[in-house]
Amino acid sequence: MGGFGSIWHWVIVLLVIVLLFGAKRIPELAKGLGSGIKNFKKAIKEDDDEEMEEIENKKQEKITATKTEKVQSTKTSKED
């Protein structure tokens, strides 16, 4: 019954927003909010891509180190 889901609650909230910001500024605020969300998602994606690149580089370094160790151990065993 008394939850925040009532249509009248939303009408009052919308009316207060229109009174505070004016009808002309609401689209500007929505555009700014959308742009901010878009930039935030882009930054998160770039951060994830950088992390994945670092992980791949570490894997490659580990593989290279393992191969180098095998080659060195093979050379050592042939010399004996």
Image (tube, rainbow, N blue to C red):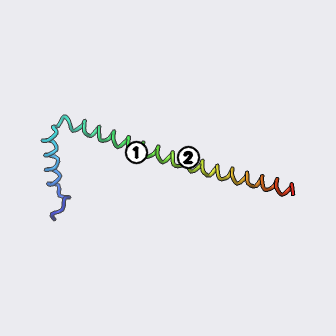
- The residue at 16%/44% (across/down) is 17
Q: Which mark is residue 64?
A: none
Contact? badges 2 and 1 (CB < 8 Å): no
Task: Indicate the secondary structure of the residue bearing disc 1.
Answer: helix
The quadrant of the image that shows the N terminus is bottom left
Where's residue 62, x and y in %?
A: 65, 53
Q: Name the residue under label 2.
A: 53
Q: Position of residue 74 (x, y in %)?
A: 81, 55
Q: In this view, does 36 lie to the left or right of 56?
A: left
Q: In which quarter of the image is residue 38?
A: top left
Q: What residue type is labelled 1?
A: Lys
Q: Which of marks 2 and 1 is in front?
A: 2
* Residue at x 73% of width, y 54% of height: 69
Label 2: few (<14), some (14–19) or many (≥20) C-alpha neighbours in 10 Å: few
Which residue carries the number 1 mark? Answer: 41
Q: Which amino acid does label 2 sit on?
A: Glu
Q: In this view, does 73 lie above or below 40?
A: below
Q: Nearer the viewer, residue 63 or 76?
A: 76
In-front residue for pair 60/65: 65
